[in-house]
């Protein structure tokens, strides 16, 4: 072993990939920032001693000193005499999502449907911001008030990118939104009256359940199988009750990962036409064009909506998405959007559209897809023999627990072993009992090794079976 190899073996943390261009000390400070942002470096953690890192990276100690000083100047780390340089900030057990995550410093979070953490993402975004700041006209436009539908230029950029993904929308039929959740809410709020009913898969995205509740709508569950909603069950429901809108995730149901065949999409459209239902297709869980079926708006343009968001491919914090709507309904939606927010923010739209149009987004998506393939392969290997369902582009798998496991016990036992999962209840429409199954998200861990740790703990738990912890009296 030479001196570099020895140093690499001993360093507690090393920048994970090629340094970004620019002065080495600055790029190293950027890499420290990215590692903190994606959880690789945790609050309180000590950075490697300067001499060791210098040897490992084959740079001078002076470069490392400058990099640590730069990180300190940015408020990322603090240096204390005698105890080295440590990551500053809030303790890492602070939940990322107050309503969902209960991850702690030692636990592996498999509960959230979020993009795989990547320093590449932060680097790309930083470059996009610089590029935008160098284009005075684009900046000027972004800083103006926008129309309710959003700027035409941004809608055109977005439609061009979406068409490249085989989502053939016209800019005139798009409304820009503050992410997918906003678009879901907007459609329900503008087009379904309190007391009217929406129907969805019996297991569906909790955000839709929340929208229906907030708006005082009836939310009716429809039975599912491995392709998602069953047409016979939908037909029976429509014979009994007036349903105004059908909410679907045909490419990739959250949480069951079900994908709908072309034949089934056509059967659903036929029922929607017969009973005059609106169809809201939520495409936020992103699927690449090769694996995607025909969107509902191509089968029934007069009644189908499509929601796209950048949350699963670029960033959930950017809060940017769009809604494709039938032309006749756009004025009603635009009026509602105007009353709520005036329009989606021009600056956010400019950044998101620039990111998509620049080609950077495509390389980030390709990177994420490659990483997802490796993570799915790991899942297949570790859960071989268990009853689970996953989609190759999906952020999660749906695991049916073997007898006699109950989902609530499994989630609790997993927590005790340091793995955070969500229970199935939030996905259940109405008061139906929750299935003995759990959603396992494979994207939150920063590394595949951390994912392996979490999945291995779950597999061990499955193999051991539940312990009888219940009191007998
Ligand atoms: C099906 C579905 N729709 C909408 C959303 C929310 O998307 P956004 O972050 O763009 O509001 C999510 C987030 O997980 C989702 O899974």
Image: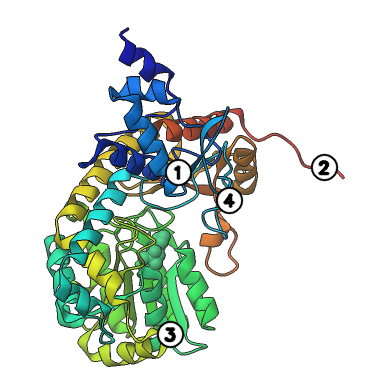
Q: How many marks?
A: 4
448 vs 315: above or below: above
300 relative to 70 in the view: left or right = left
Question: What is the secondary structure assignment of the residue under circle 4?
Answer: loop
Foreground of the two, 248 or 122? 122
Q: Residues within 10 Å of mark 4 (few under 14, many from 20)?
A: few
Distance from Cα at disc 1 to Cα at disc 3: 47 Å
- Residue 94 in view: yes
**Quadrant of the image occupied by residue 323:** bottom left
| First-in-chain label (2 vs 1) | 1
Q: Secondary structure at mark 1?
A: helix
Nearest the viewer among 252 and 448 is 448
Structural distance between the alpha carbons of marks 2 and 3: 46 Å
Marks 2,3: beta carbons within 8 A: no
Q: Earlier in the sequence, mark 1 or mark 3?
A: 1
User: Does residue 419 sit above or below 385 in this rendering?
Assistant: below
Which residue has dot 2 on it?
A: 471
Looking at the picture, tell me which residue is in the foreground, 281 or 85.
Answer: 85
x then y, percent, for residue 386: 46, 35
Q: Which residue is denoted by mark 4 in the rendering?
A: 94
The residue under label 3 is 189
The quadrant in which residue 52 appears is top left
Nearest to viewer (mark 4 / mark 2) = 4
Label 4, label 3: how many angstroms apart (C-alpha)? 33 Å
Q: Can you tell me whether the CB of the residue at mark 1 lies under 8 Å from the nearest atom of ligand 1? A: no
**Which residue corresponds to mark 1?**
72
């Amino acid at each position: 072993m030479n001196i570099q190899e020895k140093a690499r073996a001993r360093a507690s943390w090393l920048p994970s990939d090629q340094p970004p261009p620019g002065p080495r000390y600055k790029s190293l400070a950027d890499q420290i920032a990215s590692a903190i942002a994606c959880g690789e470096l945790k609050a309180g953690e000590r950075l490697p001693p300067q001499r060791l890192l210098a040897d490992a990276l084959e740079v001078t100690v002076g470069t490392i000193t400058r990099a640590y000083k730069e990180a300190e100047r940015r408020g990322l780390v603090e240096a204390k005499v005698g105890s080295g340089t440590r990551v500053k900030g809030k303790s890492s057990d602070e939940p990322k999502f107050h309503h969902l995550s209960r991850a702690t410093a030692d636990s592996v979070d498999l509960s959230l449907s979020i993009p795989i953490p990547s320093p590449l993402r932060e680097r790309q975004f930083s470059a996009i911001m610089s590029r935008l700041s160098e284009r005075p006209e684009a900046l000027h436009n972004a800083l103006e008030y926008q129309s309710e539908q959003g700027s035409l230029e941004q809608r055109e950029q977005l439609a061009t990118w979406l068409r490249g993904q085989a989502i053939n929308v016209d800019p005139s039929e798009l409304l820009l939104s503050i992410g997918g959740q906003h678009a879901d809410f907007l459609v329900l709020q503008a087009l379904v009256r309190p007391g009217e009913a929406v129907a969805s898969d019996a297991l569906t995205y909790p955000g839709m359940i929340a929208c229906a509740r907030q708006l005082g709508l009836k939310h009716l569950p429809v039975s599912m199988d491995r392709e998602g909603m069953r047409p016979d069950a939908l037909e029976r429901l429509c014979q009994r009750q007036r349903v105004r809108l059908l909410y679907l995730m045909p490419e990739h149901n959250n949480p069951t990962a079900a994908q709908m065949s072309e034949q089934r999409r056509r059967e659903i459209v036929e029922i929607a036409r017969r009973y005059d239902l609106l169809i809201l297709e939520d495409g936020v869980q992103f699927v690449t064009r090769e694996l995607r079926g025909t969107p509902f708006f191509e089968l029934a343009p007069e009644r189908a909506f499509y929601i796209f968001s950048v949350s699963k491919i670029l960033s959930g914090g950017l809060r940017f998405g769009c809604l494709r709507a039938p032309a006749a309904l756009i004025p009603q939606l635009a009026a509602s959007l105007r009353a709520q927010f005036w329009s989606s923010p021009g600056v956010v739209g400019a950044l998101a559209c620039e990111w998509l149009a620049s080609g950077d987004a495509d390389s980030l998506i390709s990177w994420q897809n490659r990483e997802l393939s490796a993570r799915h392969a790991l899942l297949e290997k570790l859960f071989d023999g268990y009853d689970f369902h996953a989609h190759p582009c999906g952020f999660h798998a749906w695991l049916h627990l073997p007898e006699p496991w109950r989902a609530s016990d499994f989630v609790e036992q997993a927590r005790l072993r340091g793995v955070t999962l969500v229970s199935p209840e939030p996905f259940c429409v109405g008061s139906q009992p929750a299935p003995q199954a759990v959603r396992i998200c494979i994207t939150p861990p920063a590394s595949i090794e951390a994912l392996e740790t979490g999945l291995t703990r779950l597999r061990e738990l499955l193999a051991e079976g539940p312990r009888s912890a219940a009191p007998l009296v």
